[in-house]
Image (tube, rainbow, N blue to C red):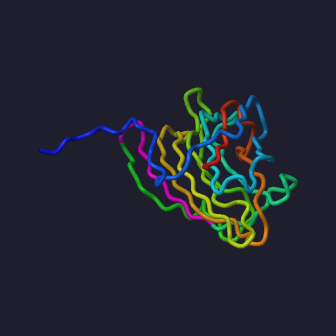
Amino acid sequence: MSTYTDIRYDYNLPSGFGGSLNLISEQTASGSSSISFTSGIDSSYRTYIFKFINCHPANDSVNFTFNLSTDSGSNYNVTKTTTLFHAEHAESGSDATLTYRTGEDLAQSSAYQYLGYQGADNDQVVCGELTLFSPSDTTFVKHFIAKISNQHPSEYARNIYMAGYGNVGGSAINAIDFKFSSGNIDSGTIKMYGIA
């Protein structure tokens, strides 16, 4: 007879699953134009995770975006190639779709990368995470992936998946900036973790 063990709540996984998640810093917005991390992204960790918690825009119908820097935040203009798709479902129960978003991907562009189209009602926020791999490497491009849950201005639940790379093989990434395409970040927290 086999025995079933429920390990859903055991977060002390074996070392083969990777190291621990270490909080490096966090920032909370209050009418902020953007949230930038200009220190702490270095060779201390191979992988960094940024968690977005209840980021609420001041303006309605805006894009949540990010960009990378190789000069500690003096410029956010890293050339990127990305791909993006999302699943969505309306509160009314209609319009359940899964779509590749050709208008929100980038092809060798230094523009800010789209992470979601967001409403500003009191109950509408962006949550999710972005993972940045080996930002201090000076040989390879810098890969990243993001998973986002947000609410479209027209009352759709959206699950967004984005992946890509910063095409800066010869330089290290050492800063990252998050902002809405128009207006301030009214409230919300972004936390930066390193994986040991």
- Quarter of the N terminus within the rendering: top left
Q: Nearer the viewer, residue 134 or 186?
A: 134
Looking at the image, which residue is at 59% across and 37% down? Answer: 119
**Left or right: where does residue 153 sit relative to residue 112?**
left
Front residue of this view, candidates 155 and 188: 188
Residue placed at 70% from the left, 60% from the top?
135
Residue that sits furthest to the top in the current view:
122
Q: Image height check: is 178 above or below 91? A: below
- Give the farthest residue toward the right: 74
The image shows residue 174 at horizontal and vertical percentages of: 78, 55
At 41% from the left and 44% from the top, the residue drawn is 89
Count all numbered tags in the image, as a single digit: 0
Bounds of the magenta segment: 82-93
State whether the magenta stretch is mostly helix, strand or loop. Answer: strand
Looking at the image, residue 11 lies above or below residue 78: above
Quarter of the image for residue 183 reads: top right
Residue 87 lies in magenta, yes or no?
A: yes
Give the residue drawn at x 81%, y 60%.
70
List x then y, in percent, for residue 11.
Answer: 45, 39
Residue 195: x %, y % from top left: 60, 49
Q: Is residue 192 left or right of residue 149?
A: right
* Magenta-colored stretch includes residue 152: no
Location of residue 55 in the rendering, given as x and y in whole percent from the top left corner: 63, 35
Left or right of 184 on screen, residue 18: left
